[in-house]
Amino acid sequence: MGTKLNHTADLDAVDAYLADCVRQALAGEPWRAWPSEWHSPEAHKAIIKRCHFHGISTILAVSHNAYSGWPKSVSEPLLFEARLASVWEESHKKTLIDLFANLADAGIEATVMKGTALAYLVYDPASMRRRGDTDLLIGIADLERTRRLLKNAGFSTYSSPHGLYSQESWQLKVGHHLTHIIDLHWEPTDRPVLQRILRFEDFFQNRVALERLGSEVYGPSPVQMLIQGALNQAWHTSRGYNVAEDRILGGRRLVWQVDYTKLLKRFNDQLWDELIQVCRERDARSIVYAALAGTQKDLCVQIPERVMEDLNQSPKQSPTHCYIMEPESALTKLRDINVASSMSKRRKILKMAVFPPRDHLVSEYPELAHWPTFALQLRRYASSIVRVFKQFPSR
């Protein structure tokens, strides 16, 4: 492996080493020795960046031999990051407990999703599960009351990324450079195509208690958590994941593999059968299979053979998988419009696709920030047309 870590082969070696360390940390075993050839400052910076991508600094930090044998230039910033995460978690937990108590007093039923649900269901301490926000699902009938409740608690809304139809972000600054973000959802996912898999009503059935956050706080069923995690992983694999200023495409984040590893310990035959049935009925087999196969490869997790055999499906046979993995284009928008549940949703998707705001266009084409808005829109239309034609095979 080259010390500059410039090549895919180098990153593959780093990922394999980090996967071994995570697996050994979870098992309470000594870690693999630090490779002696990874000695340059450039290599150390690249490895820290890869740890950030994988979201594993806090998972490794709670190991009994945390970062033993690692160079200090690598271990010290990662341990510092883990300590900051622990401080943030304590503050975030208090904020959440107060918020959920207020929701309960107001009679607003909510389900905690994604990272926070996992953190308080299967991680101990919860700070092991790195994240920057809490995803909260409510009914649309409770939206205005929840907004007022968030405002009264000191939260303020801010501009969410372009293209979101069924969620918005709220933030609370509490001093010491700590910020708490609530991603408020009234659908489990923004994309109508994926709402056929992640159905609102399923997130309020067979829920699990998150007792560390309050007596009336719940997360989705383990089956829904697993499917949502697999869809989220596939989406970010295709469209990239932000690490600082970089957008990283591809790769399996190890924190997601740890999520599955810990979550699967709660599975019994009944939950496995439910998972298979839901994946079959909703075209999620290939997506969940890819997530579980990655967990088997990275962390050597044992999954019933019958489950993997049943879920094993070519991605090309799955319209949902193809939708997630193809580049964003007019075709993906048309598919969302076609399956949207109401005319108002169709109009909203179409409006955002045809007339994106200037800040979104500038973020998409930063080198053209000096162009007028109409010219940026024309540039975007041209790019979309090219992407559409590239998806059709030449004859």
Image (cartoon, rainbow, N blue to C red):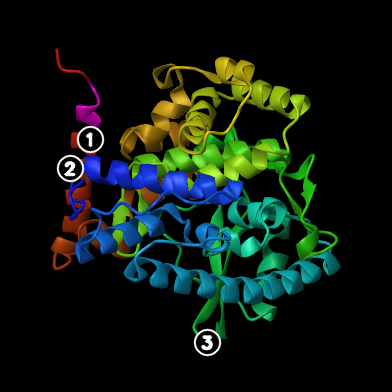
Span colored in magenta: 387-392
The stretch drawn in magenta includes residue 297: no
The x, y position of residue 120, in whole percent, is 70, 57
> Is residue 97 left or right of 162 when viewed as pictured?
right
The x, y position of residue 279, in whole percent, is 60, 25
The answer to which of marks 1 and 2 sits earlier in the sequence is 2
In the rendered view, would you say 50 is above or below 314?
A: below
> Is residue 344 left or right of 213 when viewed as pictured?
left
- SS assignment at label 1: helix
Where residue 176 is drawn, which disc sits there? 3
Residue type beneath disc 1? Arg
Q: Quadrant of residue 395?
A: top left
Q: Which residue is mark 2?
A: 382
Residue 66 in view, yes or no = yes
Callout in the foreground (1, 2): 1
The answer to which of marks 2 and 3 sits earlier in the sequence is 3
Residue type beneath disc 3? His
Q: Quadrant of residue 92?
A: bottom right
